[in-house]
Amino acid sequence: MTVRCFDGEAYSENLTLNVGIDNPVDAPPQVAVLSPLSGQTVPPGDLLVRGTAQDVDGQVTKVKLLIQGYPLWQLATAGAADWSTWSFALNVSRWAGQNVTIGAKALDGIGASPIVNVTFKVEPLQGPPQKNPIKEKEEAQNMTLWWGLLIIVILAVMLALFLVIRNRRRRNEDAQRKRKEEEAAERKAKERAAALAAQLTIATPSYGGGYAPAPAPLPVLPPPPPPSSFGPPPAEEYAPGGPYGPQAPPTQYPLQMAGGQDVLLLPPGMPEGPAPALTSMPMGTQPLMEVSCYNCGGKVPVFTAQRPTSIQCPACGAMGEI
């Protein structure tokens, strides 16, 4: 090491110093297992594992053991004075008839010793098995865990079944409600059609079959004679059947219909005899009957005997069926 000083104007001469640094390497502690020894056979039951530990340049602070089947290191118990002797109580009945390996290490606060492993054999159980509190506790915990998982699975299955049944019931209720709505709509449509049909009353009822008798035909007055520069028309034109004479009443033709014997009133000029199968009447002829319009109340002529048949009111254009 070289040093010098400075007074603000100049430096002093250099001074060299030799300094030695002592940095020793820490030696790890040592551990040994005295009982049981590797290859030894021990009886089942409680076993006291004993050993020693030392540190040449420090002090042992603790000793830990790793026992077969345990995931964590277990802390041993120090001797009366220090960790130069240590022990650990262990019940080895759970390994009856098997080999057991125990690892030990010592710590000095800086580092740890190499792990020392000891493998020994446990004799088989003789007579009734001895109870192992640790093993029984672990089995009880495992059993509790399995029962908990089973209960969770059962609850999940019950919940799934409940959801399936509820969804199916809702679908059935929706289908029944829809079917009832369709039936109600169909019933309303039928009632409306029946009401409309009831409004279509026949103005000129048929004879027989329980209907009221037909009214007497109104007299037909002859039209006035046309003016003529040649005098009055001949007398035969004013005779019955002539163009200016009284018109003959309509001929009645029987027509077999449901409910009894009915007759139709046909216009003059049609041949007498059995009622013809009329489906329509030419324009300008007398209608077979008239019905009242359900919309405006006007008279609707009917020119056909076919049933059912569609009709239309000439006044308002409403459609109907008889």
Image (cartoon, rainbow, N blue to C red):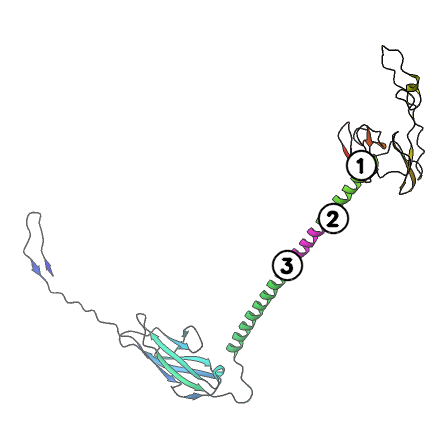
Question: How many other residues sit within 10 Å of disc 3, few (<14), some (14-19) or many (≥20)?
Answer: few
Left or right of residue 156, residue 35 in this image: left
Question: Image point 72% across, 51% down: which residue?
Answer: 176
Q: Position of residue 304 (x, y in %)?
A: 82, 36
Q: Nearer the viewer, mark 3 or mark 1?
A: 1
Dot 3 or dot 2, earlier in sequence = 3
Q: Which residue lies at the image location 41% right of the left edge and 81% below the top edge? A: 101
> Circle 3 is placed at which residue position?
164
Whole-angstrom CA distance, mark 2 to mark 1, is 24 Å
Magenta region, main secondary structure: helix
Please state, as top left, top right, bottom left or bottom right, where the C terminus lies in the image: top right
320 and 174: which is toward the camera: 320
**Residue 174 among those drawn in magenta:** yes
Q: Mark 1 — residue?
A: 196
User: At label 2, which amino acid type do we have?
Assistant: Lys
The residue closer to the viewer here, 163 or 50, is 163
Q: Of helix, strand and loop, which one carries label 1?
A: helix
Which numbered disc flags the more N-terminal residue, 3 or 1? 3
Q: Which residue is mark 2?
A: 180
Q: Earlier in the sequence, mark 2 or mark 1?
A: 2
- Which element carries disc 3, helix, strand or loop? helix
The kind of residue tagged 3 is: Val
